[in-house]
Amino acid sequence: MRIAVRTWLAVLLLAVGTSPAATPPKAHTANAVTAAKPPGAAIASAHTLATQAGLDIIRTGGNAFDAAVAVAAVLSVVEPVSSGIGGGGFFLLHDAKSGRDVFVDARETAPESATPAAYLDKQGGLDRDRATNGPWSAGIPGLPAALVHLSEKYGRLPLRTTLAPAIRIARDGFEVYPRLEKGYASRRAVMERYRGTRAVFLADGTPPVTGETLRQPDLARTLERLATKGFDGFYRGDVAEKMLASVREEGGRWTRDELAGYRVREREPLRLKYRDWAITTAPPPSSGGVALAQILQVLEGWDLAKLEPAQRTHLIVEAMRRAYRDRTIYLGDPDFVKVPVARLTSPEYAAGLRASIHPDRALPSALLSGQPAPLEDDETTHFSIIDAEGNRVSATQTVNLTFGSGLVPPGTGVLLNNEMDDFALKPGTPNAFGVMGFKANAPEPGKRMLSSMTPSWIESEEKLAVIGAPGGSRIITQVLLAILAYDAGLAAQPVAALPRFHHQWMPDAISAEPGALDAATVEALKAMGHTINAGESTWGNLQTVTWDKRSGALDGGTDPRNPVGRADVLLAPAK
Ligand code: GLY
């Protein structure tokens, strides 16, 4: 794996030409949709049991959307550390029959009780405990509604079939793996405040240990209700009443109407062109697509392959810096605030940003006016699917921080998210992270909190790649680097393995994984004025599948940073 990555970096290192002079954007070829279909299905997810469940559903006659329901639900069972039916997510779909792309927004919504004042401590500061732990940190879940919506509108198998693998694994258990054990240890003090959570994770008296079997019989029953009753199985009746009672018992406030009134939104995906690629990605309330559009359109002014690594990295970082600055000012839920998407993603705006980039000097972030704010946190999961009919799913789902709010309402098995922390809970006032200032993402009843989740795909006349990743604010730069790597000719697995770097305007420093920047590049970047946190621990968990339309080859890449992930291909039987 590392050898392939190094090979690619070496190619870039050897690339000739040192001038960063901007070149005019390349002419684009139209997004050619060929008549040919993939020779089978490909699925990549962060857990082998989820990928297996999706492939089994395809074998049973399901399409990519049925498989997505199965994968999403199994991830909810085996990765409570990252996502679950107590959380939310975004599903980017391509329906081959209609040729339509749709973005299913199943982001959590703010309950009416969640006013900014509710998150202040006695001194008037942000109450970090309320914002991240227990009932006040939880938004109204969206994932169960998404599973029902996907199944009813796009799938062809009943939920009883597509949820069966998740129900079985919840009931019979799965093997605890190190990331889950470690994640639990890091959140243990919060998790064990709540009797419902203790009943799940301390069922045998001790916290989950790698190699043990974790069974979740209450979650199995809740999933069974969802399978038989659909939306009402979660948002009305017994499960809903138990969630309401627990939130109340722990001092929070949700209402029956907020649960019963939750709806997914279907939105137009955000589309952009980069060189020969047509890119389809996440619109607001994700900040991901807008940032991606800004960064890629800025970078299109240079032929990156012809630049030496330090110059190339400098330009990518400067583009990242500008896009992350804008996201803190302008981005929020488009149902509540006017987000200037057209302006921010226009080539003219990108040209202006590009013109502000010095070829070999870093711009201190402090000189870019704006209002720093905390960015989204980093436990989340992604999966990518292509099926033999040409359908696609790129889905990212989350409970926000490791194990979300830590609160499982007794008798439900549902671990509630702590997505409220993705709002600017205290706009205009300094908090632990710096000055917090933007209004676009302030909480309001029914509003969706800003996200970085960036489920995407890129397509040319010859190739298709479905991509996404978890990692909070680092999601966007993971997807960006993956797109640049595909453009440079890498295959799916080396793309998933590629060492990463990241800059998010504030803090004003480049974060770099081991191996991402060699010593000479680090020195050259420092000489340009960049601060570098080289050799940070690794991050992300990218899952990608590809289809080469010329050769017909399907392929998948699963992030080697997460040993329990799996990418696999299922070829259709020969006709
Ligand atoms: N909670 C992580 C995100 O939505 O980006």
Image (cartoon, rainbow, N blue to C red):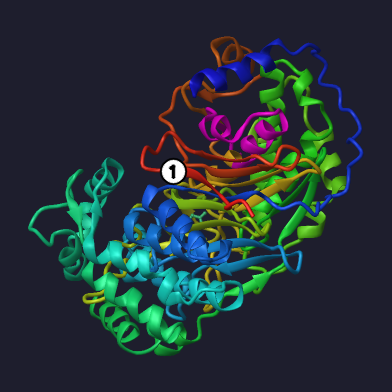
Residue 526, percent across and down?
60, 17
Please give the name of the residue rendered at 64% of the width and 45% of the height, measured from the top-left corner. 324
On the picture, is 329 further left or further right than 401? right
User: Is residue 248 placed above or below 389 in the rendered structure?
Assistant: below
Please rate how many residues cluster around mark 1, counting C-alpha atoms within 10 Å: few if below 14, some from 14 to 19, many from 20.
Answer: many
Please give the name of the residue rendered at 49% of the width and 43% of the height, measured from the top-left corner. 567
Residue 552, by quadrant, is: top right
Q: Which residue is nearer to you in this view: 493 or 300?
A: 493
**In magenta stretch: residue 491:** yes
Which portion, as a residue range, is magenta?
A: 479-505
**Does the rendering let one see residue 252?**
no
Please give the name of the residue rendered at 59% of the width and 68% of the height, measured from the top-left corner. 105
Please name the amino acid that badge 1 sits on.
Arg
Callout 1: helix, strand or loop?
Answer: strand
Q: Which residue is mark 1?
A: 566
Q: Which residue is nearer to you in this view: 234 or 229?
A: 229
On the picture, is 234 further left or further right than 207? right
Residue furthest front in the image: 575
Residue 446, percent across and down?
53, 78
Q: Which residue is nearer to you in this view: 348 or 173?
A: 173
Quarter of the image where the C terminus is located: bottom right
Residue 248, percent across and down?
28, 81
User: Is residue 433 placed above or below 131 in the rendered structure?
Assistant: above
Residue 289, percent across and down?
68, 52
